[in-house]
Image: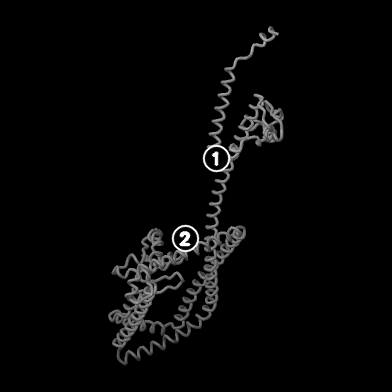
Amino acid sequence: MYLCINFLYWSFYRNIRDPKGVKLLYDVLEFDPVISRVVLFATNNALVCESPEDAMHVAYEMEREGRYDAVALDGTFYQKSGIISGGSLDLARKAKRWDEKHMSQLKSNKEKLTDELREAMKQSRKESELNTVDSQRKGLAVRLRYAKSDRERTLKQIKDLESELKDLERKLDESGPRIEEIEKQMRLRDQEIQEMKERMNSVEDDIFAEFCRRIGMSNIRQYEERELRSQQERAKKRLEFDNQKNRIMSQLDFERAKDTQNNVQRWERAVNDDEEELESAKRAEKLQMKEIEKDMAEVDRLKAAKLTKKSEVDSMEEHISKARKDVGQLAKEIQNVQKSVSSLEGKLEARKSERHSILKQCKMEDVAIPLLQGNLEEIAQDSGPNDSMDGSGLTQTLYDRVSQIVVDYSSLSDHLKDLDDSDDVRKMDTKLTKVITDLSVTLQKIQAPNLRVRVNEH
């Protein structure tokens, strides 16, 4: 089940175009297909990027589908929770610092620089100290200026986010009833999803029943959890052993590189000189660090508030997107209903016109129609001067008069009253029309009596 759910998201992860070169960690690993499920569970949806900037962008700045764990090629791991840690390349780079030849060269350079510094300090000790403090002061002033600029920019972003959040809250209040309905539908869908998951678990249990029975597990999910826990424990132990080995090797190299007592005395003198310089620099640094720490604490607080607001805005945008989708669906349904109503109104107007034509024909042919209400005399040949014409050429007033005429169908036979289907009505209409036509033909064949002959006989 875990593998099936992850496959649903891979199409998006494999189509990331900005930044370039982003790949799934699962795709770049080489492993035995037998352990593919374990590797997928361990890597999850982590992404591999070409540079630390791309990894930081993927982990903290992509907003379309959320944040992702990302690792750069230099080994830096950016977790979506905000934690940044170094990788194997970072450990290798640190280990190179203990290279014996490089260490010896650095020591030689340090001794040379220390001697030069001692000579320069003898000539102008006070001037060197003032220059050092002034340089540190300028560096701290630059850091302070950048910190203030970052603080102002963060405050402006927070104001913009607060304004946008107010607008979103107003829109959310306006769409409250619809959101409640959508949430109700979501709960129903969540229930359906839970039922589907249970059916999927049942199918998995049926498929892996023989395998679980052989390994002594109740289900495949218990096996996956046990394997994942075992793998994590092994990885943790391996990392602890590697760290311990690196510490021992570093300490061993350091001990081997130690010099004689002359080096100790020389380093003691150098340390004393450095400590005097360090104390002087610390006093100047404390004055600047207090203000910087205060500003940095404020910046951290504002950044945390920014992340909180941003998460709230993302949540609101997701709800608004769902609400807009539902509103569009409702608009389509309303449009379809309006089309149906227009069609029915057209059919109703046609029926009215047809009824008017039938009643008018009956009036012109002096057909006696039993009526419960109204009179055929109310049907006018033409519309009045004050009547407004509609699309069929008949006046609305004429339709109103015709609608007041109620026909009495009590004299009809029961089998004619029981006709509900349109096909049966059409067949009966055809049959009666044929009977009327036959009677009309017969009537035309009958010769009129000669009334003049009868008068003469009398």
Q: Picture coordinates of residue 437 (x, y %)?
A: 56, 24
The answer, for residue 51, to whether it is visible in the render is: no
Q: Residue at x 36, y 88 (%)?
A: 267
Which residue is disc 1 drawn over? 421
Left or right: where does residue 185 sit relative to residue 275?
A: right
Could you say where residue 244 lies in the image, as x and y percent from the top left? 34, 84
User: Where 78 sits versus 395, above or below?
Assistant: below
> Which is more foreground, mark 2 or mark 1?
1
Secondary structure of the residue carrying tag 1 is loop
Compare residues 98 and 229 and report the one nearer the observer.
229
Q: CA distance from mark 2 to mark 1?
A: 57 Å
Q: Viewer-proximal residue, 237 or 153?
A: 237
Mark 2 surroundings: few (<14), some (14-19) or many (≥20) residues within 10 A: few
Q: Quadrant of residue 97?
A: bottom left
The residue singled out by tag 2 in the image is 64
Task: Work out whether residue 387 or residue 375 is closer to the camera in this orientation and state it.
Answer: 375
Mark 2 residue type = Arg
Furthest-top residue in view?
456
Looking at the rendered structure, the secondary structure element under dot 2 is loop
